[in-house]
Image: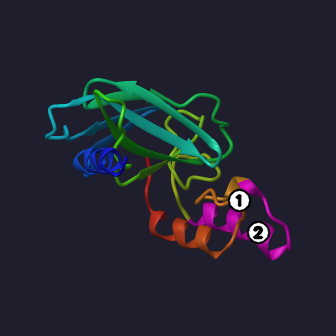
Amino acid sequence: MNKILMILLLASVSLAGIKITEFKVCGDSVRCFWDAVPDTDVVLYRLHFWRGMDNRFVLTPTTAVIVKLLAIPDSVFQRWNFAVQAQDRSGNCSGYSDSLAGYFTGAKHRLYGDIDGDGRCNIYDLLLMLRPSILGRSDLKFDLNDDGRVDITDLMTLLPLLGRSK
């Protein structure tokens, strides 16, 4: 019995080390590319994508896939994470690759950090974010890092974006 467990463990280790090499976003679609695992026994890859408890995956025999994120509200940005696993002929899965994250909104061509929707990330967006905090309120549409609260980390996320425009 120990020998079987050891073989499965070695198979799992030999499939590890996948890296997502390219990550492109176009509207509500995400295109992910990754390097093939040098093991010839790999039959398919699983691209996992998740937001909180909403975990989904797609299966593909190739090293690229396009994922469409549906039902994202226009008023907020959501963080989605992506990671890849490889699966061999016996059904053994590798560990997850390093994950990548992207922020998405349902509004087409909306600039990340552009809270008022004017096509620029500027001082007005900063003021819109600060106003509810000053008044002792919280509005999740200002939750830029999608952690479920509006705090200093959201402000620190917005600051380097100031000055960007479409």
Task: Specify the quadrant of the image occupied by residue 66.
Answer: top left
Circle 2: element type: helix
Foreground of the two, 105 or 14: 14
Q: Are marks 2 and 1 in contact (CB under 8 Å)?
A: no
Residue 166: % across, % down? 43, 45
Circle 1: element type: loop
Give the residue number, with chain letter if any, for mark 1. Answer: 148
Foreground of the two, 9 or 155: 9
Task: Specify the quadrant of the image occupied by residue 62.
Answer: top left
Q: Residue furthest right?
A: 136
Between label 2 and label 1, give the one nearer the viewer. Answer: 1
Q: Amino acid at mark 1?
A: Gly
Q: Amino acid at mark 2?
A: Arg
Give the residue number, with chain letter if any, for mark 2. Answer: 131
**From which residue to which does the magenta span run?**
123-140
Q: Residue at x 45, y 69 (%)?
A: 160
